[in-house]
């Protein structure tokens, strides 16, 4: 994409947002703060996803203000040759309007003097609620300044509204530009998984001491080699029983001949996340019980993929997954029929939760757990109540989101078997998850992450290579 196309893309998003602000509306969107890691070192800066969605601007310490009339103002770091020697190039407010297609730009230190002027005679102030610590206080300060001018005839806004709802709806349906980036992110991440699988088998064949971090290093290599800026989230590389810890992070545990390894890792590319999980035998060959459990998870994923299509509900892939997994748990003896009854009981009483305790997916986009309501907006008021059989809590169900082309979600069933006397010993400590990234199409869905295979035979074949 050339500069003008990308320029137009962000301008079009700002115009769409402006049209939603209502008469007299004004929106304030800061980027993320820089954060200290320890003493003089900072965490790698990552912009705020809402701010980036509307500007494509990646510098820290920046703010965007949009009026309902479509006027956009950027606040950004002023040019400062000394700071630029230390920290790098700054676009600066003089160049920003031309470079980003905005109406005007000011240096960020001018926020406190300019914002009261921008807020004067406005009716509704929109900003992201509960995301930026201290933002409400700053807006209060600017509104106080507007109030002091009421006696001169100025009008002070009389309403504040959460901007997240509007932006979440916009971000939920991805455009062609976003999907192209996400496809590429999926390809890079898929290659990274292949690389890690092959390294695992090669090291085990060579009799080397394989550690989880060796495989993590392969992922990072592949991400960066193809221009990804960083992992989209902390990579999970979990050998053996560690795979049963859902939020385990790549550490230094040994990867043993005979173990299964679960890798949940995806790169972030130009702001967009990918999110892939594969589970494979460390040595490249599934044992019988490993294959049985793996094929069950895969069958449940296939059912979920078939349920991911326009017009279906977000919850449908989850329900399809649970049905297959629950039946498999009964068939493989992970649940005892005498204790838990039949398939419908296992589902209704949530007995399956013992081995499958998470949802089958989430929205994916600029954030790995991307924004967007999981409830269909037109049906928010339709509720039904039920008592959760496990927690005893009353849960209010609202109709789940209807899937539409351009929505992107993960499909990630799993099975996690903790040791217990009533579970066949050959399944103990196995943790298996298979996760792919799906974009809803006109007729079904496209899996953007299948550059790394999922069939057990295909995984074995690539690990022999
Ligand atoms: N990697 C985070 C998730 O799968 O939700
Ligand atoms: Mn995920
Ligand atoms: Mn994941």
Image (spheres, helix red, strand yellow):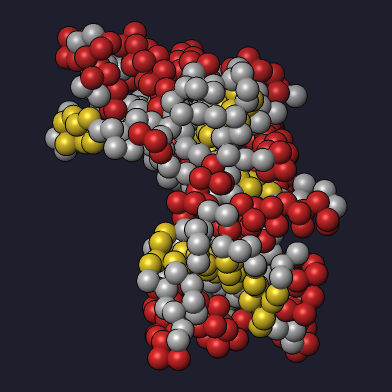
Q: Residue at x 51, y 58 (%)?
A: 21
Tell me: residue 219, above or below residue 455. Answer: below
The x and y percentages for residue 184 are 73, 39
Is residue 366 visible in this depiction of the protein?
Answer: yes
Q: Residue at x 47, y 37 (%)?
A: 362
From the viewer's side, name the closer residue of 147 and 178.
147
The x and y percentages for residue 373 are 43, 42
Q: Tell me: 147 left or right of 237.
A: left
Q: Quadrant of the C terminus?
A: top right
Q: Tell me: 137 left or right of 390.
A: right
Where residue 215 sits, quadrant-wise, is: top right
Tell me: residue 14, above or below residue 359. Answer: below
Is residue 277 visible in this depiction of the protein?
Answer: no
From the viewer's side, name the closer residue of 101 and 107.
101
The x and y percentages for residue 10 are 69, 55
Q: Residue at x 83, y 56 (%)?
A: 4
Tell me: residue 313, above or below residue 219. Answer: above
Q: Residue at x 54, y 21 (%)?
A: 309
């Amino acid at each position: 994409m050339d500069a003008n196309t990308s320029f137009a893309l962000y301008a079009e998003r700002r115009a769409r947002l402006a049209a939603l602000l209502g008469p007299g509306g004004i929106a304030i969107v800061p980027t993320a703060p820089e954060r200290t890691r320890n003493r003089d070192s900072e965490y790698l800066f990552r912009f705020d996803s809402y701010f980036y969605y509307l500007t494509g601007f990646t510098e820290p310490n920046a703010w965007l203000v949009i009026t309902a009339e479509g006027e956009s103002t950027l606040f950004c770091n002023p040019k400062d040759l000394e700071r630029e020697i230390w920290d790098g190039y700054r676009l600066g407010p003089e160049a920003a309007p031309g470079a980003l297609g905005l109406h005007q730009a000011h240096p960020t230190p001018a926020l406190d003097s300019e914002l009261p002027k921008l807020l004067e005679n406005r009716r509704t102030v929109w900003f992201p609620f509960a995301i930026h610590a201290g933002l409400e206080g700053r807006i209060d300060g600017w509104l106080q300044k507007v109030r002091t001018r009421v006696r001169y005839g100025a009008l002070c806004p009389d309403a504040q509204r959460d901007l997240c709802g509007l932006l979440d709806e916009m971000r939920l349906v991805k455009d062609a530009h976003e999907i192209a980036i996400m496809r590429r992110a999926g390809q890079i991440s898929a290659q990274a998984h292949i690389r890690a699988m092959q390294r695992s088998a090669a090291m085990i064949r060579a009799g080397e001491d394989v550690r989880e971090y060796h495989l993590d290093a392969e992922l990072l290599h592949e991400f960066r080699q193809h221009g990804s800026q960083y992992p989209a989230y902390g990579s999970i590389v979990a050998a053996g029983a560690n795979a049963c810890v859902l939020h385990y992070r790549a550490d230094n545990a040994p990867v043993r001949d005979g173990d299964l390894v679960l890798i949940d890792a995806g790169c972030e590319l130009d702001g967009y996340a990918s999110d892939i999980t594969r589970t494979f035998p460390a040595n490249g060959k599934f044992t019988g019980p490993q294959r049985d459990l793996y094929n069950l998870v895969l069958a449940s994923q296939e059912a979920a993929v078939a349920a991911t299509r326009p017009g279906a509900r977000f919850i449908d892939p989850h329900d399809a997954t649970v049905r297959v997994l629950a039946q498999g748990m009964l068939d493989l003896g992970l649940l005892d029929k005498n204790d838990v009854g039949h398939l419908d009981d296992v589902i209704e009483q949530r007995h399956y939760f013992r081995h499958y305790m998470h949802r089958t997916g989430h929205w994916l986009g600029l954030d790995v757990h991307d924004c967007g309501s999981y409830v269909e907006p037109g049906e928010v008021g339709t509720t039904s109540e039920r008592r959760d059989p496990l927690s005893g809590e009353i849960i209010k169900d609202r109709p789940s989101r209807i899937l539409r082309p351009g929505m992107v979600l993960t499909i990630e069933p799993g099975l996690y078997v903790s040791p217990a006397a009533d579970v066949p010993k050959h399944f103990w400590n196995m943790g298996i998850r298979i996760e792919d990234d799906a974009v809803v199409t006109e007729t079904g869905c496209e899996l953007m992450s299948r550059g790394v295979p999922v069939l057990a035979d295909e995984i074995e074949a690539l690990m022999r290579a």
